[in-house]
Image (spheres, helix red, strand yellow):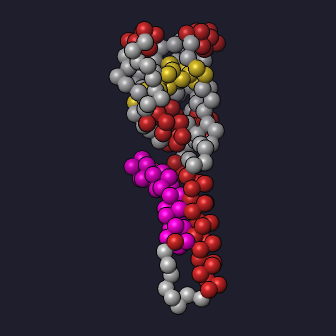
């Protein structure tokens, strides 16, 4: 399945709970034909109310647990290098909608959690980009914006061609890490996601 189709279906799945709520409102509130028996009218209204509650409930459920991130500090990167661990750094901001989508739809995927396990997983909050600390990070990593994901090898240098920017799906990330991180060959089929 192509990435475009995957994004379409992910969007459709996010939209379905709201469709259920609207359909429930229609069944509960729009007057049925006069010929509908009283028992079916009650059943229609109860079914409509149930669909409203189910749709809203599904729409506001919290995201499933996903990748566990460590907040950035220079000591975290130094420790990873001293232990010989590769690092994945997620640069994000509170005001960044694609950053929130990555947390909810990409980093919550069990295959993404699995493929990022060998990495030290670090999040850097760039909400206030103008701070001296964040300006130094922007310069050090050559950031153009958020979200940006940078992969460092065990020596602390960036894997060539590994940087990701903008939103990407779970399968895109898993395939990217599989292609990039040859030290841990792991093939993942699209239907497994």
Q: Is residue 124 visible?
A: yes
Identified at 37% across, 25% down, the residue is 145
- Point out residue 58 in the picture as x, y percentages from the top left corner: 59, 54
User: Closer to the camera, 57 or 105?
Assistant: 57
| Residue 64, magenta (yes or no) | no
- Point out residue 133 in the picture as x, y percentages from the top left corner: 46, 10
- Point out residue 80 in the picture as x, y percentages from the top left corner: 60, 14
Q: Which residues are magenta?
A: 2-28
Q: Is residue 1 visible?
A: no
Q: Main secondary structure of the magenta part?
A: helix
Identified at 54% across, 23% down, the residue is 123
- The answer to whether residue 161 is left or right of residue 182 is left
Rendered view: 188 above or below 83:
below
Rendered view: 35 above or below 125:
below
User: Closer to the camera, 193 or 51?
Assistant: 51
Identified at 46% across, 27% down, the residue is 93
Identified at 53% across, 58% down, the residue is 17
Q: Residue furthest bottom?
A: 35
- Point out residue 183 in the picture as x, y percentages from the top left corner: 56, 25
| Residue 16, magenta (yes or no) | yes
Rendered view: 12 above or below 130:
below
Tally of numbered tags: 0
Q: Quadrant of residue 87?
A: top right
Q: Quadrant of residue 166?
A: top left
- The answer to whether residue 4 is left or right of residue 68 is left
């Amino acid at each position: 399945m192509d990435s475009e189709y995957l994004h379409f279906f992910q969007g459709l799945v996010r939209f379905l709970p709201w469709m259920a709520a609207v359909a429930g409102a229609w069944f509960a509130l729009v007057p049925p034909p006069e010929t509908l028996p009283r028992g079916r009218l009650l059943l229609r209204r109860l079914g409509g109310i149930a669909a409203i509650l189910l749709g809203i409930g599904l729409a506001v459920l919290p995201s499933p647990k996903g990748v566990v991130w460590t907040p950035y500090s220079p000591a975290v990167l130094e420790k990873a290098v001293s232990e010989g661990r590769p690092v994945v750094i997620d640069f994000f901001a509170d005001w960044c909608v694609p950053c929130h989508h990555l947390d909810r739809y990409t980093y919550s995927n069990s295959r993404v959690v699995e493929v990022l396990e060998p990495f030290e997983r670090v999040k850097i909050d760039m909400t206030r980009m103008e701070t001296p600390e964040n300006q130094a990070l922007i310069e050090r990593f050559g950031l153009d914006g958020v979200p940006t994901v940078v992969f460092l090898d065990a020596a602390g240098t960036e894997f060539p061609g590994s940087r990701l920017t903008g939103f990407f799906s779970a399968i895109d990330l898993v395939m990217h890490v599989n292609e990039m991180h040859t030290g841990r060959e792991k093939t993942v089929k699209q239907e497994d996601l």
